[in-house]
Amino acid sequence: MGASASRLETKLLAVLGASFVAGILFWHTWPLYPFKLLVVLMHESGHAAATLLTGGSVRQIVVDRREGGYTLSLIPPGLWSQIVVSSAGYLGSTISGCVLLLLAARSKTGRWPLVALAVWTGFVAALWVRDPFTLVFVAGASLVLALVARFGPSLLRRGLLVFLGTFSVSYALYDIRDDHFGSAAVQSDADALAQATLVPAIVWGVVWGLLSAVLVALTLRFVLSSRAPSSRAAPAFPKRSAA
């Protein structure tokens, strides 16, 4: 049991490393396209969740075929609500990825986390998706996740969780980099927040990037430390000779 579990975790760590490398080398290739759209959905879901937590209401979530997206919502007036909702996109992607990594490390089969993902995508579609492209994509994502959860082997299910988690946190960091240090022409969340707070957008981008990096580091530290054997051999004591 211990040896096989150790080998399994080693395979998952290999998937984590391969996912990170694949994100760097094949970032603009078509196989990663659906995963980018799924992370965009996570990003926009973060905005939606923060809107609800601050007492606002969500009208619509849109995932654009050009790997963008937006959330139409009404939030309560006030600077704090604006900061929380605007920050929840990038940080929401990072938190979602970290949760997936933790679930992959803790779940023996990975089935129920994938079922939860399928339910979540369907829930988002039912409540807030109206446009045809986003509906088709979300329905397809829910179906694939459900099929893998039902018929996929354990290693595939847990490997998919690790891949999605790694890709999500990587995408959040890459997105922050592209929006604030690249040539992005569209207005970012940080640009909107800069207009509300007069704090430069690049400052918000750096703060979100640092927070994301810290969250990822803490998650990986926990995952790696949890690989240590849970039980230790009992100390040996010399037997007492009979009197």
Image: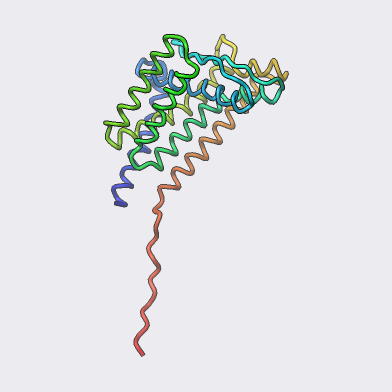
Q: Position of residue 156 (x, y in %)?
A: 30, 33
Residue at the farthest bottom position: 243
Residue at the farthest front position: 126
Residue 229 horizontal side relative to residue 43, left or right? left
At 34% from the left and 87% from the top, the residue drawn is 242
Q: Of residues 45 and 6, which is closer to you in this image? A: 45
- 223 vs 178: above or below: below
Q: Of residues 12 and 24, which is closer to you in this image? A: 12
Q: Position of residue 52 (x, y in %)?
A: 59, 25
Snapshot colouring: rainbow
Q: How many marks?
A: 0
- 135 vs 51: above or below: above
Q: Which quarter of the picture shows residue 148?
A: top left
At 36% from the left and 90% from the top, the residue drawn is 243
Q: Where is residue 104 in the image (x, y as percent from the top left)?
A: 39, 38
At 54% from the left and 27% from the top, the residue drawn is 92
